[in-house]
Image (tube, coloured by chain):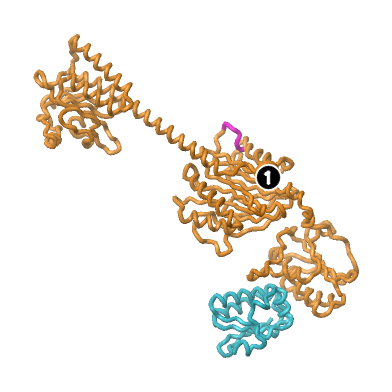
Chain colours: A orange, B cyan
């Protein structure tokens, strides 16, 4: 090897040269400090030093670790080689980058590392090279080289190398500073954009409904943006459409999908007043464009403040909780998969819907970030914890109730595991404006009335229906019904018993008591079961324009009998009483 | 309840007899859907039906819809008074094709 490393070199400079050195170094440092463009500053530094050393040319190479090459970032001299890349470690300059040592190569033709092909391409004739590394601490960033000293013996001296080493060191610091500054600028830019995204996202959520509005909701993102969303708006007919959803995953990707889902809901909901059909459409839209297997769980519903009736559809979402006026909870589990997994999975009837009568109660829809959130004692709140808090705050206004629930998890100071979102729809004000709201609540059955004909207790098996029909037919005759009326009453009683078997007991073994009496000009049939209380609001005669199997029985009963009502058993024991009355002419 | 089926002309005649109630309608439903799958022209003889409930009516509706979807014929024939009453209550007497006799329906 013909080179000498900087560490071997004895520094010897004259007083005059030393002063020049200092001046040059201070100028270069000023360039680096003042110039915003690092490449321009490096080029200026290179020019100053090439000029000072009276060199024919010079170049500055920086290491690109990713691509494993060194690239010429600045050059001076007759040939412009900026942008030229060499494989890492190749050439004299590459060797310098790798070793971190400065070198004086007095005759390149004797150095096997010399890459003659660059000269061959450019026509420049390299004779000698002075090369110094650009390092900061132990990190090798690149190297500076100057070529062919013009004056004197045309050879670089050890003091030239020292000079170049000094330039390399200050260039290194300038490069590191510039890179850090660029990263900071980029980080600030990303943060500003995220903040903007968060602002836009907040604008997608509806404004509070104002005094007396039955819906309120809270969303607390775990990060700057959220994958949770909710919406509510009033339709022209006075009903209120509402939804709450949770996009799988977190961060900006989830936030973008949230923006899509909530926009689809808001836009399509104005035209499609069936939550099941709406979710079906949103599902197909999201499935057709879903990326990275992202999906959305969502519950949507329509509520009528006039009647307290609510239609709900749940696509894979955490079961919403309905709390009635007595503090009893009913969960509404998902009857369909989340949105975005497969398009067109629902039939012509859309996603399944359920009907509920709020009757002064409230429905709470929330994301699992809430139920899986940590309480102050470190335990998860869970659905039970949520119910407990809702019971404790039952007397407060609905917005206070959900703020209180959120406050259990979002205590400040501790980072959230997941976004927290909850929506409440409260019927307790609207129910007061409903003069007839009490009629849905089952009344107490009275004690015996009239002359009792029959009182039999039977197991709820389909084979027993035959007995019930015979008993009813004979009793009707005893009450004075003609044959046609008797046949009709048989149909009504048979269907009522079927409802007990199929719906009250849901096919489980049970018992029912059939009592028939004659009171004035009426035949009164009572059907007593011992099943859990029936939600009276769910029992509706079906729409006869809708031709499909099933759902006819209740229609038959209402069509045939003159008066039909559900009553709470007089004995105070659990169960239901269906009292049916038929006038006998 | 009794179920019987026989061919008449190019039709398959399914005869339901007795009480088509919750206990027996699953059998009736199966027989009717089988018939609709097998033959493009099905006639259901209801002359011997002494009682039919909503579950029995549902079986008729489902079979009727299946036949119509497949482009087949589905006719109720010689409907007994009690069955007709239930069809009327369900407002289905105008939906089904009802023939006075099996022969007329199968002809």
Residue occupying the point 21% across, 12% down: A18
| Residue A501 location (% of width, % of height) | 72, 67
**Residue A109 visible, this angle:** yes
Q: In this view, does A193 lie above or below A429?
A: above
Q: Is residue A277 above or below residue A244?
A: below
Density class for disc 1 (Cα within 10 Å; few <14, some 14-19, many ≥20) is some
Mark count: 1
Query: Magenta segment: does it hold A411?
Result: yes
Location of the N terminus of chain A by quadrant is top left
Q: In this view, does A388 lie above or below A159?
A: below
**Residue A3 visible, this angle:** no
| Residue A327 location (% of width, % of height) | 73, 47
Q: Is residue A431 above or below residue B92?
A: above
Q: Which residue is labeled 1 in the image? A: A213
Q: Quadrant of residue A73?
A: top left
Query: Magenta segment: does it hold A301?
Result: no
SS under mark 1: loop
| Residue A354 location (% of width, % of height) | 64, 58
| Residue A41 location (% of width, % of height) | 28, 25
Residue farthest along the top direction in this orientation: A15
Tell me which segment is drawn in magenta. A409-413
Of A28 and A272, the residue lying toward us: A272
What main secondary structure does the magenta stretch of the protein show? loop
Residue occupying the point 84% across, 69% down: A524
Q: Which chain carries label 1?
A: A
Give left or right: position of A439 versus B74: right
């Amino acid at each position: 090897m013909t080179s000498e490393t900087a560490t071997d070199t004895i520094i010897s400079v004259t007083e005059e040269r030393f002063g020049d050195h200092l001046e040059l170094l201070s100028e270069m440092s000023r360039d680096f400090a003042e110039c915003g463009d690092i490449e321009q500053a490096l080029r200026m530094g290179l020019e100053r030093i090439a000029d000072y050393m009276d060199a024919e040319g010079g170049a500055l190479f920086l290491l690109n670790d990713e691509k494993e090459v060194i690239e010429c970032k600045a050059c001076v001299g007759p040939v412009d080689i900026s942008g030229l890349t060499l494989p890492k470690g190749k050439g004299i300059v590459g060797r310098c980058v790798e070793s971190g040592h400065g070198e004086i190569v007095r005759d390149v033709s004797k150095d096997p590392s010399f890459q003659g092909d660059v000269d061959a391409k450019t026509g420049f004739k390299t004779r000698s090279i002075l090369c110094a590394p650009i390092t900061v601490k132990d990190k090798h960033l690149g190297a500076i080289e100057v070529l062919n000293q013009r004056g004197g013996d045309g050879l670089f001296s050890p003091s030239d190398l020292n000079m170049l080493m000094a330039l390399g060191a200050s260039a290194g610091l300038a490069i590191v500073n510039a890179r850090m500054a660029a990263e900071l600028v980029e980080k600030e830019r990303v943060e500003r954009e995220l903040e903007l995204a968060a602002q836009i996202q907040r604008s997608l959520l509806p404004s509070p409904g104002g005094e007396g509005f039955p819906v309120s909701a809270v969303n607390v993102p775990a990060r700057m943006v959220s994958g949770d969303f909710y919406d509510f708006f009033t339709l022209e007919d006075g009903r209120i459409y509402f939804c709450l959803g949770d996009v799988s995953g977190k961060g900006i990707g989830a936030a973008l999908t949230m923006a899509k889902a909530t926009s689809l809901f808001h836009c399509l909901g104005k035209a499609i007043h069936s939550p099941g059909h709406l979710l079906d459409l949103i599902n197909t839209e999201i499935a057709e464009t879903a990326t990275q297997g992202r999906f959305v769980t969502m519950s949507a519903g329509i509520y009528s403040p006039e009647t307290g009736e609510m239609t709900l559809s749940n696509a894979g979402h955490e079961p919403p909780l309905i709390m009635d006026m007595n503090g009893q909870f009913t969960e509404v589990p998902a009857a369909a998969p989340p949105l975005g997994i497969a398009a067109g999975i629902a039939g012509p009837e859309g996603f399944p819907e359920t009907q509920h009568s709020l009757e002064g109660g409230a429905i709470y829809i929330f994301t699992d970030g809430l139920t899986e959130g940590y309480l102050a004692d470190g335990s998860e709140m869970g659905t039970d914890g949520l119910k407990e808090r809702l019971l404790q705050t039952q007397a407060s206004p609905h917005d206070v109730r959900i703020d209180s629930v959120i406050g259990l998890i979002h205590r400040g100071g501790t980072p959230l595991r997941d976004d927290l979102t909850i929506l409440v729809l409260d019927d307790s004000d609207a129910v007061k404006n409903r003069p007839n709201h009490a009629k849905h609540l089952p009344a107490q059955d009275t004690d015996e009335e009239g002359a009792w004909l029959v009182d039999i207790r039977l197991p709820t098996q389909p084979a027993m229906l035959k007995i019930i029909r015979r008993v009813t037919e004979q009793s009707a005759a005893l009450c004075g019904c003609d044959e046609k009326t008797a046949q009709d009453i048989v149909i009504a009683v048979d269907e009522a018993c079927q409802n007990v078997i199929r719906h009250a007991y849901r096919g489980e073994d049970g018992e029912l008591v059939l009592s028939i009496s004659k009171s004035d000009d009426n035949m009164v049939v009572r059907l007593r079961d011992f099943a859990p209380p029936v939600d009276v609001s769910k029992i509706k005669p079906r729409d006869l324009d809708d031709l499909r199997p099933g759902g006819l029985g209740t229609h038959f009963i209402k069509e045939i009998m003159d008066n039909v009502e559900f009553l709470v058993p007089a004995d105070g024991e659990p169960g239901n009483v269906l009292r049916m009355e038929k006038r006998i002419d | 309840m009794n179920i019987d089926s026989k061919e008449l002309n190019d039709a398959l005649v399914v005869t339901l007899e007795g009480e088509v109630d919750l206990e027996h309608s699953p059998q009736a439903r199966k027989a009717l859907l089988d018939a609709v799958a097998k033959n493009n022209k099905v006639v259901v003889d209801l002359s011997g039906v002494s009682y039919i409930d909503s579950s029995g009516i549902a079986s008729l509706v489902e079979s009727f819809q299946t036949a119509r979807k497949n482009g087949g014929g589905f006719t109720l024939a010689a409907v007994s008074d009690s069955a007709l009453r239930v069809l009327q209550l369900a407002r289905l007497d105008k939906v089904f094709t009802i023939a006075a006799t099996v022969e007329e329906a199968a002809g």
